[in-house]
Each structure stands twice: as C-alpha cells, then as structure tokens.
Image (cartoon, coloured by chain):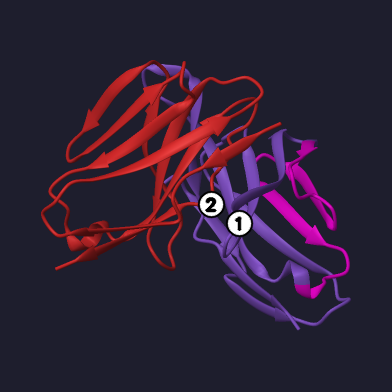
Chain colours: A purple, B red
Amino acid sequence: DAGITQSPRHKVTETGTPVTLRCHQTENHRYMYWYRQDPGHGLRLIHYSYGVKDTDKGEVSDGYSVSRSKTEDFLLTLESATSSQTSVYFCAISEVVPGHLDYNEQFFGPGTRLTVL
Amino acid sequence: GQSLEQPSEVTAVEGAIVQINCTYQTSGFYGLSWYQQHDGGAPTFLSYNALDGLEETGRFSSFLSRSDSYGYLLLQELQMKDSASYFCAPRADKIIFGKGTRLHILP
C-alpha cells in the first residue's frame, strides 16, 4: 500500500458538466499519473506530474486538464464531460524498484468509476 | 512508432503452467514489467526485467530478450486466484501498458 486514495470512488454525471477527480498520496512521491481504463484498450496515460506545478501530457490528454499545487494532491478535471469519457480512472505513483534504479514501479490507487450520461 | 502485442485471452487448467507472451516496439527501451489486475481491482506490480534472461519470483517468472523485443510471463502451479488480467508494460521514456491478457483457469 503506497498510501494512495482517490475520490470520489464512483460518480455519475451529465454531458457538459465539469468533473474533478482527486488523487491523494501520503508518502511524498514525486511522480504521479492519471490513467483511464476501457475494455479493449487497456490502460492509457492521460497526464502525469513530476513535481509541484510540473505536468505533462500522455497519449489521451484531449478533454482533460490536471493540476498539482501540492505534492500530495493530483487533480484531474474534465472541463465539459462527454459520454466518451465514461471510464475507470486510476491514479498511480512511482517508486524505485530495489536493484533497478532505472525503473519506477507504479502503485495504483483503487480507481474511480465515472459514468457520463 | 510504438506497438505492443499480447494475446487477449488464455485458458489453462488449475495446477498447470501457462506462458503469456509479449512483443513490443518502442522508441527507446529500458526494461519490461508485468502487472496483474483482478476484476474490479487495481493493477499491481509483478516483476521487472531490465536485462535479458529469466527472473523468478515464487510461482511467477518473467523473461526478456531485448534483441527480439520479446518477453513472457510464466505462471506455474496455477491456482484459481491467478484468474486475472496480466499486462506487459515496456518502459521507454514512459511506461506503456498493453491491452492485457485475460487468464481463465479451469478447475
């Protein structure tokens, strides 16, 4: 357990409304990630952060924005939710694998199931 | 470009051995990791190979051939609790996750 929580765990919203998902970690990890998981697509990276106020886009960033004003919190915002954004969203942090300093093992939060009607 | 291939589903019998293959093409490569995900759960880390060869962790082993851009996950003495999805994830400048292999285990 890397001390990662996500809120809310479930949310149903309507098309066109803004939605913010929160990822909170308690162990001062530098790297944080947002993924979405859909049947047939596996896990796809939306955005990631490598420090406070330092973020970058992943492969499916359109329609999403992120913010990281504190080390412990990484927020994912859907400015105007669409039905195509119905998905399970996972937050993750990185930790170095012992003996492999070039690799950061990812620990995932429990996920948020978002439904956009 | 980047590509990643692994079988979508594999079925095996309890107590048997199963191998899940992964081929990848990435811009830059550091190593290959494997993650397990049970239905309704979050992915969890299983193993990481930075060098060619076999790495063993209990009933699970993972293999990498960098020259062939190929790796596999070997699960031995299969148990019903091993029914899950397994993702290979090569690391380039970022980690790339495949679509996953759903492992079905028959009693």
Q: Label 1 sits on what residue type?
A: His
Q: Is residue B80 left or right of residue B97?
A: left
Where is residue B47, by image quadrant? top left
Q: Are marks 2 and 1 in contact (CB under 8 Å)?
A: yes
Q: Quadrant of the C terminus of chain B?
A: bottom left
The residue range painted magenta reads A55-83
Q: Label 2 sits on what residue type?
A: Lys
Q: Is residue A21 left or right of residue A43?
A: right
Residue B44 bears which disc, if any?
none
Q: Quadrant of the N terminus of chain B?
A: top right
Looking at the image, is A14 positioned above or below residue A109?
below
- At 32% from the left and 38% from the top, the residue drawn is B73
Q: Residues within 10 Å of mark 1 (few under 14, many from 20)?
A: few
* Alpha carbon distance from label 2 to label 1: 5 Å
- The residue wearing badge 2 is B99
- At 46% from the left and 21% from the top, the residue drawn is B68
- At 46% from the left and 57% from the top, the residue drawn is B42
**Element carrying mark 1:** loop
Q: Is residue A71 magenta?
A: yes
**Element carrying mark 2:** loop
Residue A72, visible in the rendered structure: no
Instruction: Report x, y in % for residue A7.
Output: 61, 65
Where is residue A69, by image quadrant? top right
Q: Residues within 10 Å of mark 2 (few under 14, many from 20)?
A: many
- The residue wearing badge 1 is A41
- At 45% from the left and 56% from the top, the residue drawn is B8
